[in-house]
Amino acid sequence: MNIWGIIWIERNKMTDVLVIGGGIIGLSIAIALSQKGANVTIVERDICGRGATWAAAGMLAPEAERLEGDLLDFGIRSREMYPQWIASLMRLSGQDCGYWCCGILAPVLEESDRQLISEHPHYISREESLKRQSDLGKSILGSLWLPEDGQVNNRKLAQALLTAARLLSIKILEGTTVYQIGRDRDRVTHLDTSAGKLQSDRYILATGAWTRSLLPLPIKPIKGQMLSVFDGDRKLQKVIFAQSCYIVPRQDGTIVIGATVEDNGFSQGNTASGIAQLLNKSISVYPAIADMPITETWWGFRPHAPNEVPLLGASDFKNLVLATGHYRNGILFAPITAKLITDFIVDGIDDESIDLVAQVKT
Ligand SMILES: Cc1cc2nc3c(=O)[nH]c(=O)nc-3n(C[C@H](O)[C@H](O)[C@H](O)COP(=O)(O)OP(=O)(O)OC[C@H]3O[C@@H](n4cnc5c(N)ncnc54)[C@H](O)[C@@H]3O)c2cc1C
């Protein structure tokens, strides 16, 4: 802990922080703040970890996702934080999170694309791809091999975070909806919730795709449909990240297949065309899927922010901090978000111009 952290805790022994939203982002920040001595409450309208956090595939894939510039640095830093973050969470919770640095194969399916990326330092031929993962579809001409990208089981991770939060005595108000943020000029005064009025010294907004229902921020839901199949042979040992589908093998034989990208608000449910698209694509890339039983279908809403850059840090209100808009990479970005938001609050930085994503470079 740095000197500012110690001073902050001394001065604020009972600093109350109220986190709105109990997804991976709210939970991770709540735990990091609690470990610095804050008195934290999470307000979650449903069950913690049931939003996009539950729906995700859990890939830790800054390179396969082709993030660029500051966002790529941000993602790589967060991926590098993962082993230690998970180890400490497992120590705290006693639960496994399915973290697996299995590497990702990003196949090339068109000859024109193959020519474009054949000089890429991570490019490998079809033969080399087959050495890393057998039984790939005939359509695969070569691939990018990204050994440092990997995955975590996002549902197990959410459970471990929730257990850790409870063990740290974080107060968790599930089934409690925040209806409105009460304000007086540049300060939040209270929250109007289904459990009545709640007050705190500080507030953190971690409401994912639903953020606009509380503040007029440029966040919108992008729906993703998913399904899983079961691979009794467990032959698939690498994530396959193709152009319009990805295939994520878990260690228990479950294979998660995703995902559609639909800009149609909070429309509920799986559609036949959505699932057909995922099945057709995934079977062409990894044909053995054709004979595997389907075990589950589901959907979720990614919190999209402009330029796909999360909104982190200061808001228009001095005692409200933003932690939303993680779009396709909120599972990947969780450790670094928790650290930056906690540092931001502990060090008392009160500068609206600070760009937490870009700050990662320094
Ligand atoms: C199909 C799909 C696949 C994905 N795959 C990956 C992947 O492979 N890798 C990756 O890194 N990311 C992935 N993502 C993205 C990732 O899931 C999200 O970026 C991340 O979960 C966002 O976390 P969050 O905590 O901000 O949001 P959420 O998990 O959605 O949590 C927000 C919480 O806030 C609560 N809430 C909202 N409004 C209120 C209110 N008014 N009062 C009280 N509570 C409220 C909600 O109930 C919810 O629990 C995927 C997302 C989807 C949908």
Image: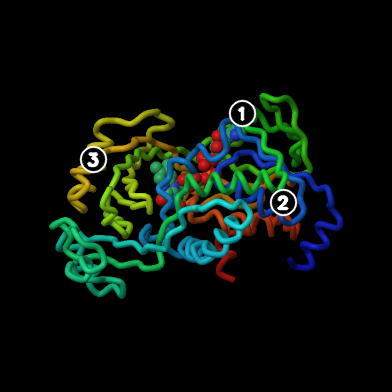
Q: SS for tag 1?
A: loop
Residue 134: x and y in percent read 21, 62
Mark 2 crowdedness (10 Å alpha carbons): few <14, some 14-19, many ≥20: many
Q: CA distance from mark 3 to mark 1?
A: 35 Å
Mark toward the start of the polypeptide (3 vs 1): 1
Residue 211 in view (yes/no): no
Q: Height in image: 172 above or below 81?
A: above
- Judged by depth in the image, the label closer to the viewer, 3 or 1, is 1
Which of the 4 image quadrants contains residue 47? top right
- Judged by depth in the image, the label closer to the viewer, 3 or 2, is 2
Mark 1 crowdedness (10 Å alpha carbons): few <14, some 14-19, many ≥20: some
Residue at the disc numbered 1: 175
User: Which amino acid, by three-letter code, is at mark 1?
Assistant: Gly
Q: SS for tag 2?
A: helix
User: Which amino acid, by three-letter code, is at mark 2?
Assistant: Ser
Q: SS for tag 3?
A: helix
Q: CA distance from mark 3 to mark 2?
A: 44 Å
**Image point (77%, 46%), residue name:** 39
**Image point (41%, 67%), residue name:** 148
Q: Height in image: 208 above or below 235?
A: above
| Quarter containing the C terminus | bottom right
Mark toward the start of the polypeptide (3 vs 2): 2
**Image point (74%, 60%), residue name:** 347
Residue at the disc numbered 3: 277
Q: CA distance from mark 2 to mark 1?
A: 22 Å
User: Which amino acid, by three-letter code, is at mark 3?
Assistant: Gln
Residue 231: x and y in percent read 28, 48
| Quarter containing the N terminus | bottom right
**Image point (67%, 24%), residue name:** 194
Residue contact between numbered discs 2 and 1, judged by CB atoms under 8 Å = no
Mark 3 crowdedness (10 Å alpha carbons): few <14, some 14-19, many ≥20: some
Residue at the disc numbered 2: 34
